[in-house]
Amino acid sequence: MTDIKTLLEARAASDPRLKAVLKKIKEGTATFKDTAYYAEVYSSITGKVFSANVLDLVETEREDVCEELLRGNYEEINNICAQVQTALDEAAGIHIKPQRAAFPTDRVDQIAHSLLDPTVKDSVIKRRANTGVANVSQGFHDSYIKVNASFRNDAGLKVHINRETDGKCCEWCTKIAGRYSYGTEPDDIYRRHDNCGCTVTYENGKQRQDVWSKRSWQAPEVGSGAPPPTRFTPEQAAEIQARNMPQGLTRRRRNGIINSITINDFVESDPKGIVSQECKEAILSTLKEQGALHMYDEIKIVRISAKNGLIEPMRTNTFYRPGYPKVVLEVNEVAFVEKSLEDINNWFEFQKYSTINSLKDAVIHETAHAKIINGLTYEQYEELNLTLCGSFFTKADEGEKSLQDLAGEISEYAQKDGLECIAESHVKLTRGETIPEKLKKLHDKYIK
């Protein structure tokens, strides 16, 4: 580890890009655009150095070295962000201690454990040590921004999130561009695709500061151009809250009544009639049987390309919003276009990758995901996701099989991660079949 760490430190210390950012931090002129760039460069260097040396490590060392490198990067990136945050706050007259997102232990364990995979080539191990490690490292910066924006909002500062395009954006970026009060921003406000040129800013209190550029400006105080605050009656406040509440939530729970997905919702989401009426009815019928109609905010027709020759017919997707996540059942048009219910069932029966044998089984599989999510806040589900996809699932006590090994008795797909294992288990249990006792306990723990 000493040689790799020394090599990383030497490479970082001599990098002119990192030197330039550190100079701006020392001068007090750095912004979060600079910290994001620093995290990107530092993470890239880490990945390249580790990838170049990972095969020289004995397998028992790879996990420890990977975890130690990422722990060091977590400290480095959080310290850089905190320095810039403190300087910006001092200039704005704000006195709030910078916050840290929790170290993503399970995510780090997952990438570290993947370096021991005996079923893949050395080139794959090197790629994981490079891009996998770099992606986890760069995520430390994203987590810092998200946690601090949330903390400042909770501390009583009036926070707004802004996303502006660079004039050369794609349709997706155009749709989410805009200015939003904290908590009403689109689910994907912080996300970006490759080569994205969008700018995201936040405003809190007196200071408005661009997250990715140098621009900052003052929001006027009352009496210097800003209007006095408007005070609402409780009735007015309730009406405004209902009007501004995320659309999916108001549809699911209106006037205290939980609303369920209907056939009309499905038809409206599929104006081209890609999914046949009998398939729509079969999907909704199974959702009803499983008591899951109210667990989805929306049914949406999407296009999901095949991966490694496999087509994903549908999936349960979650999107961030304050409190409980938005839950969407996404139906893949690639799988359903010009297919009758019989065609779909025959197709499922033919595939052997999963325990799913019919469209009904596929919907039952998805309801398992919805049931796991149901009642959890977005943060709770995200934490559970990390746990079930990490070493909890892949590691075993001495002399015992791991949950991942046991999942092989259900299906190949069940071995992907803990969430898919539970969903695949749910299908078999619903059909009245037996599964290993440890997997049944796992299923029963998260699906009531």
Image: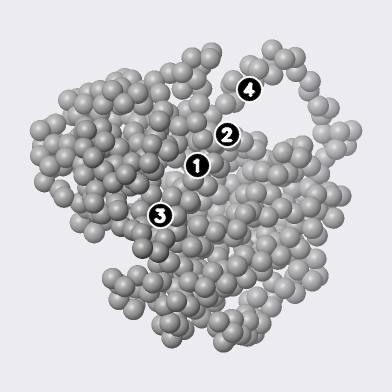
Q: Residue furthest right?
A: 223
Q: What type is the residue that disc 3 sits on?
A: Phe
Front residue (pair 229, 402): 402
Residue holding disc 1: 381
Earlier sequence position, callout 1 versus callout 3: 1
Residue 167: tell me if it is visible. Answer: no
Residue holding disc 4: 241
Q: Position of residue 359 (x, y in %)?
A: 20, 35
Is residue 57 shown above or below 185? below
Front residue (pair 110, 295): 110
Comparing labels 4 and 2, the label whose residue is closer to the camera: 2
Q: Residue at x 48, y 51 (%)?
A: 387
CA gap, disc 4 to disc 2? 14 Å
Secondary structure of the residue carrying numbered label 2 = loop
Q: Residue at x 72, y 56 (%)?
A: 215
**Crowding at label 2, few (<14), some or many (≥20) Cα neighbours within 10 Å?**
few
CA gap, disc 2 to disc 3? 27 Å
Earlier sequence position, callout 2 versus callout 3: 2
Comparing labels 4 and 3, the label whose residue is closer to the camera: 3
Q: What type is the residue that disc 2 sits on?
A: Gly
Q: Is 120 left or right of 150, judged from the image as shown? A: left
Residue holding disc 2: 323
Is residue 211 shown above or below 149? below
> For residue 390, which quarter of the picture?
bottom left
CA gap, disc 1 to disc 4? 25 Å
CA gap, disc 2 to disc 1? 11 Å
Secondary structure of the residue carrying numbered label 1 = helix
Q: What type is the residue that disc 4 sits on?
A: Gln
CA gap, disc 1 to disc 3? 16 Å
